Amino acid sequence: MIPFLSLKKQTAALREEVLAALENVIDTQGFANGPAVARFEKELAAYLGCREVVCVNSGTTSVHAALLGAGVAPGDEVVTAPHTWISTAWAISYAGARPVFVDVDRATCGMDPSKLAEAIGPKTKAILPVHLYGQPVDLDPIVEIAGERGVPVIEDCAQSIGAKYKGLQTGTFGLVNATSFYPGKNLGAFGEGGAVMTDDVAIADRVRSLRDHAQQGRHNHVELGFNWRMDGFQGAVLSVKLRYLDAWNARRRAIAARYFEGLKLADGLSLLPRNEWSEPIWHIFPVFHAQRDELRARLEARGVQTGVHYPRPVHLQPAYAFLGYKPGDFPVAEELAATEISLPMFPELSDADVDQVIDAVIEVSRQLPRSRAVS
């Protein structure tokens, strides 16, 4: 069986380094925030080329914190994409704001810049593009429109740490940006974790205050705060893993290149286009097929596990029915949600593993009734 994701080999290879880092946390007793978290914040800021990184307890929290740092408040609107993990929208709701969706671009599966301007209104307080699958969105036109309207951009980089747009790291274009260290991410903790990235010192200071019960001085709470602290063990693990991130991402790109070449022979299958301005990190390797569920079932029978990211767009989730969206409002997002399949993608896959996946996809695709490839 080729698993969709396995962390076993990676964890085994890092075991001694990680145990030593965890022992240091135990010895220093820096269990909540603490020296290990502070050290990782500096390391990640240097890696990304931004001024400030503030670690928090989850990726969902990081988006929530970024929104509050940008001044989003109850009654505001935030424009984002409907084809994403629901945490993007949760964070907007947690801030008391209303998600406003725009359809996605087939070239990136992220926010379509050509649809953005019409979604911005007098209540818009932020624009929140998502770098889905580790594939950067086309940021320049988004940032340009945002600047013309005087609205800040907040990048959701939960799947894109290490990806580059026109040579620069994602997570450095917005006023304030957010990421996740969920264990399955390219840079994943041994539990939950997230971070806010910004060049704005005032925003970073506010997020640091908010994550520790909005304290400014011991027992002096200046606003409604939260317990968003990252635990020291996660900071220690992430410092170890950051040293290997570029090598892991390079291997993911090599696997993706092998998929792109081999899957040319599959019937009815569509892949993402490769954009010359984009250096993706392939957190997910998505393909698209009109008979997605049947293809997945037959691949499973052939010993290849797959995933789906994501089967129902956010605007059609029951929790957001109150927004009044209906099927057909965002046709590209809805088509992607109905046809996307995620193939195995993690750095420890061997070339033989990848070739086995390719062979299975080609064989199974030719067994299915002929259908037009997803456009």
Image: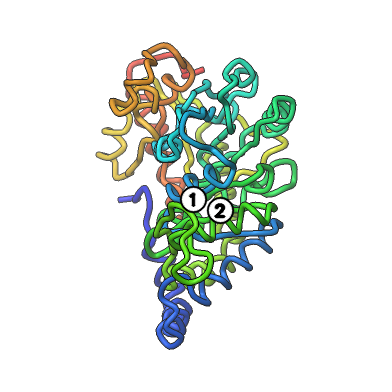
Give the residue displayed 28% in from the left and 25% down from the top: 318
The residue depicted at 50 percent of the width and 49 percent of the height is 65
Residue name at image x 41 percent, y 76 percent: 31
Where in the figure is residue 265, as x and y percent of width and height?
A: 50, 29
Which of the 4 quarters of the picture holds residue 128?
top right
Mark-to-mark CA distance, 1 and 2 = 6 Å
* Helix, strand or loop status at disc 1: helix
Classify mark 2: helix, strand or loop.
strand
Instruction: Check if mark 1's residue and mark 2's residue have beta carbons within 8 Å.
Output: yes
Give residue 367's position: percent from left, percent from top. 33, 24
Label of residue 100 in the image: none
Q: Is residue 253 above or below residue 232?
A: above
Q: Position of residue 347 (x, y in %)?
A: 49, 56
Apparent side of residue 260 relative to residue 148 in the rendered image (left or right): left
Scheme of image coloration: rainbow
Mark 2: few/some/many CA within 10 Å (<14, 14-19, 20+): many
* Residue type beneath disc 1: Ser
In this orientation, which residue lies closer to the viewer: 127 or 361? 127
In this rendered view, identify the residue nearer to me: 356 or 44.
44
Residue identified by numbered label 1: 62
Left or right: residue 143 versus residue 80 is right
Write down the residue under mark 2.
196
Identify the residue at image location x=42%, y=32%: 362
Q: Earlier in the sequence, mark 1 or mark 2?
A: 1
Front in this rendered view, residue 1 or 236: 236
